[in-house]
Image (tube, grey):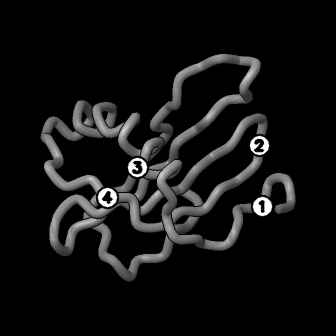
Amino acid sequence: MMCGAPSATQPATAEIQAIADKVKSQLEEKENKTFPVFKAVEFKSQVVAGRNLFIKVQVDDDDFVHLRVFESLPHENKPLTLSSYQTNKSRHDELTYF
């Protein structure tokens, strides 16, 4: 993967689901609602001074959100941050930088 360029879209892994689960409460707080369904479907990653993860998450039968999560470098020992998100997405909406 080239530094700075997002990777190709890949199916979500257990690691990506765990990351999505860790920022779920941040999204629920910002949206002022709970998401009983929160299933990571696919993702892209971007190497920066750490890593940006763009994650498509299913939150209802046909309702998705796109998350941008920042993971700092290991030596910084900082928590995952929900940097940005987009709501009202569909299964077919492409993950892009936002």
* Farthest-out residue, front: 14
Q: Amino acid at mark 4?
A: Lys
Residue at the spot of label 3: 85
| Residue density around tag 4, few if under 14, some if 14–19, many if 20 or more, within 10 Å | many
Mark earlier in primary sequence (1, 3): 1
Q: Position of residue 90 (x, y in %)?
A: 30, 75
Tell me the kind of residue under disc 2.
Val
The disc, 2 or 1, on the residue closer to the chain's N-terminal end is 1
The residue where tag 2 is placed is 48
Of labels 4 and 3, earlier in sequence is 4
Q: Residues within 10 Å of mark 3 (few under 14, many from 20)?
A: some
Q: CA distance from mark 1 to mark 4?
A: 25 Å
Across and down, in percent, residue 9 comes to: 59, 72
Asked if 44 appears above or below 75 in the picture, the reply is below
Is 47 rendered above or below residue 71?
below
Instruction: Give me the C-alpha separation between circle 2 and circle 1.
Output: 9 Å
User: Does dot 4 land on a helix, a strand or a loop?
Assistant: strand
Disc 1 versus disc 4: nearer the observer:
4
| Residue 2 higher or lower than 73, as above or below | below
Q: Residue at x 70, y 62 (%)?
A: 6
Q: Amino acid at mark 1?
A: Ala
Q: Which mark is residue 39?
A: 4
Label 4 to label 2: alpha-carbon separation? 25 Å
